[in-house]
Image (cartoon, rainbow, N blue to C red):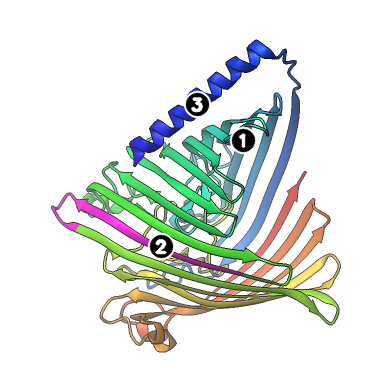
Amino acid sequence: MRYAVAILMFLFAASSLLADQSDSVNVSVTPTISLALDYDLQFRAAYYSNIDYTSAKRKSVDIFSQYLNLNVIGKFDKRIEMSAKIASYGFSGKYDNAFAMPYEDEDKDFSFFLETAFLKFKTEKDFPLPYTIYIGKQEFHYGSGLVVDSDNTGLLGAEATVELSKFLTIDMFASKVPNENFSFYGVNFNFDSLIEFTICQERNNSGFLYKKGLSTKDLADNSNNSNKIEYDNKTFYDLRIASEGKKYGYAVEAAQQKGRLSKDTAEKVDYDAYMLSLNGAWHGEILKKDADANILFTYSGAKGENCFSPTFAKRYNGLQRIGYGTLFAANTTDSFVVIPNGYYGINTLGFSFGICPFNAVGAGIAYFLFSASDAPADAGDTGFAKIYGAKADLGKEFDFFVKYKYKHYFDVIFDFAFYTPPSKADKVFANTDSSYLFQVGIISRF
């Protein structure tokens, strides 16, 4: 499939050159250049009471963190546009490996790096087969981000979007992970913004596993070769059906993972795992105040290392780990909170409700139940999660937030999250103390 993608991109690039030559012969073009600058600054102060359940000692962390990006967009004419985003992030205060994120200069806080830098070329509106080509370091995102998302750090590559009809668009993309022999490519079919079908492949020949979307190359436990591999190749088939109305919305997504993991120890794992995600949303008024509610269910199949584990799933936003639950921050594969080895496939059942009691102030609550599709023998009872086939309980979380919004330019957010680990997993969890998070965040954009 990767060769087909490369050939198609070459053909589209060649056709664009031919179109440009035709324009130069028949039309005298005077370039119209414009420049735009976007600014986004995010700051947060946070205190975590306990984040590592592989340690018997309660591990508290308090930090300040900041994320800044400057996005420069240059438009040469109606067809050509260049975008470059310069970003910086950093932590002050206590630091822990749990806060590692997939950004350049990980060991140099507050240094600047090039988050994205790409050239966009599109055809004229009346072109028989409209297409857009993106070349350079860019963001990739498809579906709900459960399989493909760049986590606010671009990947160097190319993407071609072709409008076959009013109702069908095809995206083809190919990229490489920086400093690694790791290729990532695929194709996405979008039917009238209602149905998306994505096929993509990961070919990890870097020699090391990826965990939480990060290479294990520099981890301290590599001395026992547990993270060294020959290759880790995965193919994903992802189908998403979604609709967002003024009052109701829904999203149904199902994905399958195929492929093989070959370790240096000659051990091989044949992938045959799947994921299911269901979301429902309501928007309306309560006592003449804007309100919304959401329900969520995800299931991730797993039998040991034969688990649904996309490397490029949505996990980070440039400031912190994000996911289901402000503190636990789970996706279908892993979580921010460090849990013991042997748990595979994270399932989530959740509910959230928010209301705006005043024009610029909003508040809300959320509740999540977590479980695992595979777990150690001593992990304890599954509880309610046994209804949908889970093997172990992974705890629960309650969230509360208050948000002040000044127009489009300035937000202040207060978060409180309380995570309770599974009490019957005391033989696996090194400690079973609850964890809480206090967090204040400020977001400004211009």
Q: Residue furthest left?
A: 266
Residue 318 in the image: x percent, y percent? Answer: 57, 49
Q: Nearer the viewer, mark 1 or mark 3?
A: 3
Position of the C terminus by quadrant: top right
Q: Is residue 336 magenta?
A: no
> Real-space Cα distance between discs 1 and 3?
27 Å
Q: Is residue 425 left or right of residue 285?
A: left
Q: Secondary structure at mark 1?
A: strand
Magenta residues, start to end: 250-268
* Magenta stretch: helix, strand or loop mostly: strand
Marks 1,3: beta carbons within 8 A: no
Residue visible at 71% across and 25% down in the picture = 77
Residue beneath label 3, please? 13
Say above or below: 401 vs 16.
below
- For marks 1 and 2 on the same chain, the one whose residue lies earlier in the sequence: 1
Say above or below: 271 vs 387.
above
Residue neighbourhood size for the residue with mark 3, other residues' Cα within 10 Å, grouped as few (<14), some (14–19), many (≥20): some
Residue beneath label 1, please? 86
Frontmost residue, 439 versus 147: 147
Q: Which labelled disc corresponds to residue 256?
A: none
Can residue 433 be seen here? The reply is no
- For marks 1 and 3 on the same chain, the one whose residue lies earlier in the sequence: 3
Residue beneath label 2, please? 255
Residue visible at 60% across and 19% down in the picture = 20
Residue 66 in the image: x percent, y percent? Answer: 63, 49
- For marks 2 and 3 on the same chain, the one whose residue lies earlier in the sequence: 3
